[in-house]
Amino acid sequence: MSNVKFLSGENVPLEMHKVRMVQRVNLLPVEERLQCMKEAGFNTFLLKNRDIFLDMLTDSGVNAMSENQYAAMLQADDSYAGSETFYRLEAVLQDMFGMKYFLPAHQGRACENILAQILVKPGSVALMNYHFTTTKAHISMMGGQIEEIVGAEGFKIQSDAPFKGDIDIDKLNEAIKRLGKDKISFVRIEAGTNLIGGQPVSMDNMREVSRICRQEGITLVYDASLLADNLYFIKVRDQAYKDIEIKDIVREIASLMDIIYFSARKLGAARGGGILVSDEELFLKMRELVPLYEGFLTYGGMSVREMEAMAVGLKETLDVDVISQTPIFVEALCNELAAKGMPVVMPPGGLGCHVDALQFCPHVPQTQYSAGALAAALFIASGVRSMERGTLSEQRNEDGSERLAELELIRIAYPKRVFTLSQTKYTADRLDWLYKHRELIGGLEFVEEPKVLRFFFGRLKPIGDWPEKLVAQFRKDFGDSL
Ligand SMILES: Cc1ncc(COP(=O)(O)O)c(C=O)c1O
């Protein structure tokens, strides 16, 4: 952890690593950036990486790996069944979480598919602090519903609450009473709650939710994809854990849960995923689905090289110098934007800096996808690719009407150990410029709208010629600068 004081007193995020391999990036002129955005249907998912300067879409599968992870990839055991690599990974996971069984899967949503198939019955309800897009889609596809029971602080853009991902215990009790425990498929806690700004969940909250679920006989599922950030926040925001080792915090969390699953594109800085469980009956039920959807039980759709990298990456997650890197850079960007008067989710979460599009460009109606429009405008202004996390990322209601998101955000993600302080300053500078010209940003409308997970490959167009006006203003203010 960068517990290093600067003479000036300034709080500077300090890299606890050095860079020994680099990838060249291109910064195209603003006119070309606009052209790329048009070709991508004003959807940042559809941009080509070669046209992007800073890819801050996500951390998923794009975190920087350590030299030890690369080294481990060379010793992978390529057998279809019974691979030594699997047993090495299994041992790391069992040691880390203290759970008996591990089922491999090719990524986080594949785990969600298996869990939904086993736990969700038509008409059942899954209670959770907040949904993630793929989680909700899998539950809906099995005929279930979700109900979000995050506390009120979770929806406040500016707040002092250190753990905005906490479940509201009154809402949990009320939902159990109203629905009856038999109608509840499971309760899910998402670490580092993604869609409300990467906000952590406190140990006290997990303990209480677990107590209630055990008392009622309801299965408690933990989505540990964003565990690394959450661990860091427990360590620095909860006095009681200041001196507790990360590995003991992980063990304590795991002892509260019935099932843990994760995307190793995030946790462990590799690519893959898996489910951990101690209950034999649940394990046997889920095990049947692994060969059907993923692959044989000792690889689950993953490359053995990735599994080796994951095993090392998971161990590195127990090192606070490693897991502090994303949160301290996110904090630096959030603080810089907030100091310039921009509306950012506070306190800073993990994963990325989240900007509130409703306050950034209040003149763009939410039905015209304000966060999607802001993400497009940011790319045109800077070559920085962010991700819309608002209404576009929602599914329409059953009657076809728009479901307006509670939070209309763009996420400027920090893949672990990838971006530098000058790149952070550049991003802040271009956002500052955009904020000063925010009245130029207009709305978007769909040209092609997929039915499921529409944000991934839906195509949109601007309402009016606001992107051209933005480009003209950029040229006026920045001359021939890129
Ligand atoms: C909290 C959370 N759960 C699940 C997933 C799905 O994981 P994957 O992208 O590996 O399918 C993600 C991915 O971003 C996530 O952030």
Image (spheres, rainbow, N blue to C red):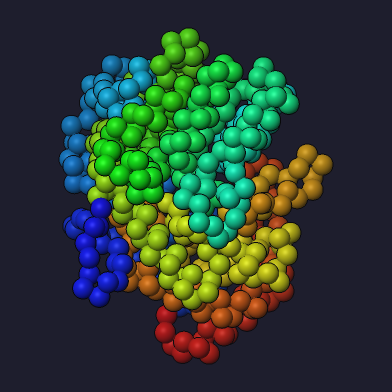
Q: How many marks?
A: 0
The spot of residue 25 in percent (x, y) is: 34, 66
Which residue is found at the position 51% from the left and 68% from the top?
A: 379
Q: Residue 92 falls in which quadrant of the image?
A: top left
Looking at the picture, tell me which residue is in the foreground, 6 or 461: 6
* In the rendered image, the vertical position of residue 28 relative to residue 66, given as above or below: below
Which residue is found at the position 32% from the left and 22% from the top?
A: 98
* In the rendered image, the vertical position of residue 459 relative to residue 204, given as above or below: below
Q: Is residue 169 left or right of residue 312?
A: right
Q: Residue 471 falls in which quadrant of the image?
A: bottom right
Can you name the residue that lies furthest to the front here?
240
Q: Is residue 306 left or right of residue 51?
A: left
Say which quadrant the C terminus sits in. Answer: bottom left
User: Would you say residue 52 is visible in this rendering?
Assistant: no
Looking at the picture, tell me which residue is in the foreground, 139 or 210: 210
The spot of residue 32 in percent (x, y) is: 50, 74
The spot of residue 78 in percent (x, y) is: 25, 26
User: Would you say residue 188 is visible in this rendering?
Assistant: yes
The spot of residue 13 in percent (x, y) is: 30, 63
* In the rendered image, the vertical position of residue 285 relative to residue 433, given as above or below: above
Which residue is found at the position 44% from the left and 88% from the top?
A: 480
Which residue is found at the position 62% from the left and 38% from the top?
A: 149
